[in-house]
Amino acid sequence: MIDENVKIHDKNSAEIKVGFVARKKQKLNNFSMNIWMFIPNSLDINRFTYSKAAFYRDMKSNIRLITPVYILRDVAESEHSPFIYLEKSFHNLASQPTRTHKSQYEYQIKMFLSILKSSLREEVEHITASPEEDLDYLIYNYKSQTQLITEKYRSLYKIINVPTINKELMEYFKYGDEFMSNTIEFHTFRLMQGLKKTGAATYKQHKEMLSDIVGDEIKYKQEKNFPVAQKENRKGNNELVYRLSMLKKYAESHLFLNIDKRKDGAVVEQLLFSLAAGISMVFATVIAFSVQQTYGNFTMPLFVALVVSYMLKDRIKDFARYYFAHKMGSRYFDHKISMSINEKNIGWAKESMDFIADKKVPAEILKARAKTAFIEANNPANNEKVLLYRTHMFIDREKLDATSEYSISGVNSIIRFNVMRLMKNMDNAEFPLFCPDEDDDFRVIYGDKLYYINLVLQKISDEQNELLRYRITISRKGIQKIEKM
């Protein structure tokens, strides 16, 4: 199964998060994800102005494992809680600080932090979307569960506070402690913000309980000399932002796969180019031999034939190379990406980008694009260029399961596409408009000059064949919104 989430990452970048979920009982899982981008002609984005190299510079792609799914309650008190693996790794390290036990100790800390972050995010979204009558017990449970989680993690300190644990290993525990505290504080603020937006009648009552969670974590961080946000300290806050970013990278580093990206079909390409050179050489040799047999050696006709055949040989070679390259483009991808973790290969991915002529766009894609506005559908000058980004993903379920004792459901591909190159040819963001004013006068008002990039996502797997459409609204100021149509 393929899941997707399209959102604004920042004012100049759209983020497409694609989850490739491998089936449990199927050893080999194949997925295809096609992203059809319909770009207004006025932006002057086409195969001549926008090369593959420019596209891949604008597109940043990360491939990582999907975080194991736990609800917050199960993290806190389930018999299958991550604390089971975490505590075991602490005991093993304290007793025998071998390289394997050190690696497992750090891995379990990182996995716990990633699971906690994911479960807090899901819990906050669930509570925010819940009806008013459910908020009392949901927020009470949220508070009790987060308190239990912090108590359990911090109690593990006693296990590793032994002579066999050096300062570096102790630092890993402290990184986890600080990240956990920051994560709970951040998501609690998000919960308060969400409840405030929904206009919950009992917000003041809930705010007091949630403020206690935040206050406890801030007090704890101050006791441990962990940095906290301060109202009147911009320099300190800047350093805190950097520290938060580094802690996030540390906590999630174990989920990112080792990637080896290479050109797809490189060997076949060289063989075909050699064949093109051979064909041109055969042509030139045949011409030379034929003229030589007819007119003999060291004659003017032979001299002319050799010059002409040499001229045509290069043209034939270039034409054959172009022909074979075109044929390869339809069968091969731009890149092939090997995916591994802990030196164990779990699959591969391929990606490719091409501009597609209107007549070659499948009818179902055009239908999903659904031009409905009269002017948009009938104005030839308002045509769109169609850019296709293809991804093919292969996951070996057995090898994926062998990488961890946790249940890993699959792989996330996180694509961030920078639109600044598309904005280069846009008009000014503010467009002047005139309207009547008092005393038969007029006034100038402004509207935004907007452009629309339509995305059609085509998801194909063994159990899925689905088309979805998103619309990205952009102006010279950046991305304004992204809508699922």
Image: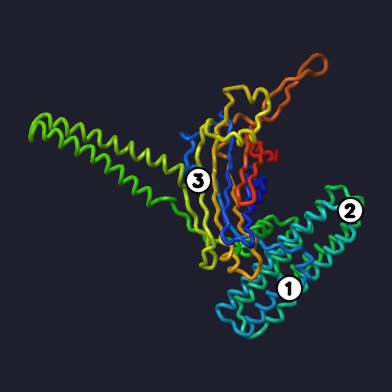
Name the residue nearer the viewer: 372 or 91: 372
Q: Residue at the location (58% across, 47% down)?
A: 33
Q: Which three-letter amino acid code belongs to the residue tagged 2? A: Tyr
**Residue 213 showing in the rendered view:** yes
Q: What element carries label 1?
A: helix
Q: Residue at the location (18% across, 33% down)?
A: 307
Q: Percent x, y for residue 418?
A: 58, 43
**Quadrant where the C terminus lies?**
top right
Q: Tags 1 and 2 in contact by the CB under 8 Å rule?
A: no
Q: What element carries label 3?
A: strand
Q: Residue at the location (23% across, 37% down)?
A: 283
Which of pointers 1 and 2 lies earlier in the amino acid sequence?
1
Q: Percent x, y for residue 319?
A: 33, 36
Q: Is residue 461 above or below residue 65?
A: above
Comparing labels 2 and 3, the label whose residue is closer to the camera: 3
Neighbor class of circle 1 (other Cα within 10 Å; few <14, some 14-19, many 20+) is: some
Tell me where residue 433 sits by quadrant. top right
Q: Percent x, y for residue 151?
A: 78, 73
Q: Tags 2 and 3 in contact by the CB under 8 Å rule?
A: no
Residue identified by numbered label 1: 153
Mark 2 vs mark 3, CA separation in Å: 50 Å
Mark 1 vs mark 3, CA separation in Å: 45 Å
Q: Percent x, y for residue 156?
A: 72, 77
Residue identified by numbered label 2: 203
Residue identified by numbered label 3: 352
Q: Is mark 2 on a helix, strand or loop?
A: helix
Name the residue nearer the viewer: 311 or 135: 311
Mark 1 vs mark 2, CA separation in Å: 30 Å
Tell me where residue 358 sits by quadrant. top right
Q: Is residue 286 above or below residue 407?
A: above
Q: Is 292 positioned to the left or the right of 79 in the image?
A: left
